[in-house]
């Protein structure tokens, strides 16, 4: 969740939500980082320039001695080339919020808003109501699970009609 997902969150960080936009950005009350680590497939996202024209988008989170490494990648539809960006994340006093950076020392919020009990899906936002992602451990979610996530996002005030669903080609699934 996610070529340049965190880059876009960095840019969104410049526009901190005031809480008056009608969107509930409260994070999950607890986040087990070890369970959150690993690979995530981007199922859907709000449109933004950094991922426009991308399919097969994934994010991989890995604990390192210096913090959390983030690797976002996606397939550029026009060129057929896989693009990758590396960044870092750090924890905050809010258990569901990470601070992420792909540029020097500029960090932005990465908010885990909802999370499947088995850490099999996540609804992620940022400091702006214009940022929303649905992530999954698998390339596709079942219809009932996706419907549940969409209801949760709508209840929080997000316009789920704005979501773009990300194609996850079969040949991409074998790459882990």
Image: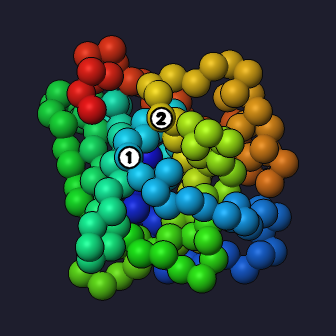
Where disc 1 sits, the SS reads strand
Report the residue marked by disc 2.
137
The C terminus is located in which quarter? top left
- Scheme of image coloration: rainbow
Which residue is found at the position 29% from the left and 39% from the top? 74
Q: In the rendered view, tell whether residue 29 sits above or below residue 117.
A: below
- The answer to which quarter of the image holds residue 11 is bottom left
Image disc number at residue 65: none
Judged left or right of residue 31, residue 87 is left
How many neighbours does mark 2 have within 10 angstroms: few (below 14), some (14-19), or many (20 or more)?
some
Q: Do the residues labelled 2 and 1 touch (CB within 8 Å)?
A: yes
Residue 126: x and y, percent? 57, 65
Which residue is found at the position 68% from the left and 42% from the top? 117
Report the residue marked by disc 1.
38
Which residue is found at the position 62% from the left and 39% from the top? 118
Residue 110: x and y, percent? 52, 65
Where disc 2 sits, the SS reads loop
**Residue 65 visible in the snapshot:** yes
Judged left or right of residue 130, residue 167 is left
Instruction: Decide which of 50, 175 is in the foreground and name it.
Output: 175
Judged left or right of residue 82, residue 2 is right
Residue 175: x and y, percent? 24, 27
Which residue is found at the position 40% from the left and 62% from the top? 6
């Amino acid at each position: 969740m996610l070529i340049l997902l965190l880059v876009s969150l960095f840019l969104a960080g410049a526009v901190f939500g005031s809480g008056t936009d009608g969107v509930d950005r409260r994070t999950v009350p607890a986040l087990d980082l070890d369970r959150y680590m690993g690979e995530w497939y981007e199922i859907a996202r709000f449109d933004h320039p950094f991922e426009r024209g991308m399919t097969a988008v994934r994010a991989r989170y890995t604990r390192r001695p210096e913090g959390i490494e983030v690797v976002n990648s996606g397939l550029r539809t026009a060129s057929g080339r896989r693009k990758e960006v590396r960044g870092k994340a750090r924890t905050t006093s809010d258990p569901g919020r990470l601070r992420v950076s792909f540029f020097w020392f500029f960090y932005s919020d990465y908010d885990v808003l909802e999370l499947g009990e088995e850490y099999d899906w996540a609804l992620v936002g940022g400091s702006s109501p214009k940022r929303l992602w649905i992530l999954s451990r698998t390339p596709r979610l079942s219809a009932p699970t996706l419907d549940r996530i969409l209801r949760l996002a709508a209840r929080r005030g997000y316009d789920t009609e704005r979501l773009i669903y990300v194609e996850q080609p079969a040949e991409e699934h074998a790459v882990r």
